[in-house]
Image (cartoon, helix red, strand yellow):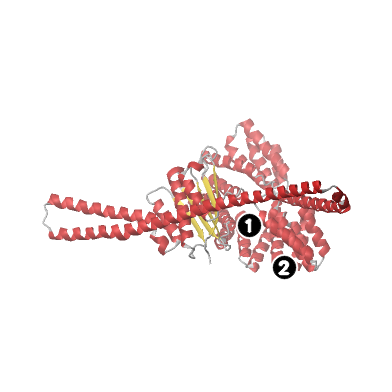
Amino acid sequence: MNTDSIKNLIKISKTDTAKIPLYFLLTSDYVQNDTDSSAYFLAEGKKLIDRSKSHKYDYEYYFTGIKIYHATQKFDKALNFNLKALETAKKNKNDFQKAEALRTLFVIYLNLKKDTLALQTAQKAIKLSENIKDTANLSIGYGNLSRLYFEIGLFKKSILYGRKSIDAGKRYHNLKGLLIGLNNTAVSEQELGNYKEAEKLFLEVLQLAEKNNIPRSKVKSLVNLINLNVFTANPPQLNFYLEKLHRFLDENPNAPFAKSDLRNLPYYEASNFLYQNKYEEAENTALKGISKVKDDHEIVQNLYNVISKINFAKRDYKKAQKYKLKSDSVQNIIDKENLSDFETELSKKYETQKKDSQIKLQESKIKNKNIFNYILLGSAFALLTILLLTYRNYSQRKKLQQQRISELETEKQLLASQSLLKGQEDERNRLAKDLHDGLGGLLSGVKLQLGAMKGNLILSEENANVFDKALLKLDESISEMRRVSHNLMPESLMKSGLKQAILDYCESLIMNQNLKINCELHGIDEKMDQTTEVIIYRIIQELLNNVVKHSEANLILVQIFRHENHKISITVEDNGKGFNLENMNLKNSAGIRNIKSRVEYLKGKLDIKSVPGKGTSVFIECEEQNYG
């Protein structure tokens, strides 16, 4: 039915309960083109639910409301409606509604940068869809996983699930899932350099969006094609898709689309002018773009880069280098501070330096003009000036010396901490070897001797049982000795490296426990300095021990990324009970002090975030030591 048919049915319907689902149909129809009208029809449906007490439609109300808030990028409100929809589906004991709510909840978690929750939700949605044979929506579930793996940089895995989404979407005629799968596969193919395949998939999205009148997908596909042609430096195609996008936006001013999709439009337009050698238009477009998006660091950096390229093309190397430096500066503060504050700080710094230079110049002129007067003031004034300069010089030197003393104290403390850690690890290594090679050998020898004696002795049945229990206790003692030795210095860390040692330790933790540990270890296959590996292992060991002892979690995520610049980032998250950071005295925690000292040894920083009932996240960024 079209919207007019639905409206006519509402007019002739005699009961409120007959009108409610019709209002929600209108809400869904209008959400693509007119979110204000869509919100109006949703509210009308809610009024009828309350008036007629038809709460069997509560799920439809909450789920339909998600569409509006998602379309308008109000993800916090969308999350609130989504959780209520999921709660209602559980109350209704309707697994189809539950699977549907889980799929949309994944997308919202992803937009809110809650990757761990998004992964858990996507897996639940797929599992439930498979269990209830909800084949029509499997495509969306696979597409959601594809998007998540793209967000965390696992592009091959993203393509794997994206292809599954495409196949399921075509097989079960799910247009939404098909569009999700095509888009996520295309962007991952682009990241891997497979530009022809990416273009083919983007064009398929565009054709489906035009055929089925889906404005948001059409805008997104056009933007993706524009971005691809900027990246591959294809001026004719870039200009073609830019003109097509502008025509569509001009002809459909009220069409809904994600504003974030158009955030890079000034960069694309400036690049288009640059490829056409229209340098003035390109630079003016980029500068206007910067003035409109001061709070978006990534876009501003792109625009600074394109201005630099424009001026290199114009052979204005000084100006080109100036904007290159600005681009580098923005890169240093991305995700750390507000760009507008940064520009304000730069502007104030420039004005201050300018004023200081003017003051010094003015003082110099006055000094030159009045030099004769200074001579006449006599030796008293000269002596006073000398004393003032001497005092200022003394104060400055004292300040510098105090600063140097503080730096030396810090270095001394760090060196002491490093020495203590190295001593601890050396002693652990020595004890592990002594236990394993010394005491372990002795106990094993005793076991062998007792075993040999048993065969040569004639014992009563009672004495034989006592003898066997003694041998069993000896086995337990040897196992305990080996466990202690392994904890002191894991053998797999020395032989197989850090990655295997962490995997072995995680496997030992989950034995006989209702606990799952997901490990994502990237770049640590290659050997690092032994001290660095041992310290990282101890950090992971201490963090996981804390989670197991205190958090009551059943899922832990361990991520380690070793970057090309020898930086190492470590993340340990859990879904446990969390705690209130303000009420916890972390400084008095021995475990936290141990972790901090090890992080400081690696010249790193530690960030702990926790919310009661929502788990804990620990992020560490440090430097690999003694690399070649």
User: Residue 56's x, y, as percent?
Assistant: 57, 37
User: Which structural element holds mark 1?
Assistant: helix
**Res. 132 visible in picture:** no
Quarter where residue 190 is shown: bottom right
User: Residue 32's x, y, as percent?
Assistant: 70, 49
Task: Report the amino acid beneath label 1.
Answer: Leu
User: Residue 584's x, y, as percent?
Assistant: 51, 39
From the image, tell me which residue sits under label 2: 233
Q: Residue at x 42, y 54 (%)?
A: 424
Residue closer to the observer: 446 or 360: 360
Residue closer to the observer: 188 or 59: 188
For the residues bearing labels 2 and 1, Cβ distance under 8 angstroms: no
From the image, tell me which residue sits under label 1: 179
Q: Residues within 10 Å of mark 1 (few under 14, many from 20)?
A: many
User: Residue 546's x, y, as percent?
Assistant: 45, 46
User: Which structural element holds mark 2?
Assistant: loop
Task: Report the amino acid beneath label 2.
Answer: Ala
User: Does residue 50 appear to the left or right of 432 in the view shown?
Assistant: right
User: Does residue 589 appear to the left or right of 151 in the view shown?
Assistant: left
Image position of 426 with respect to 114: above or below: below
Q: CA distance from mark 2 to mark 1?
A: 26 Å
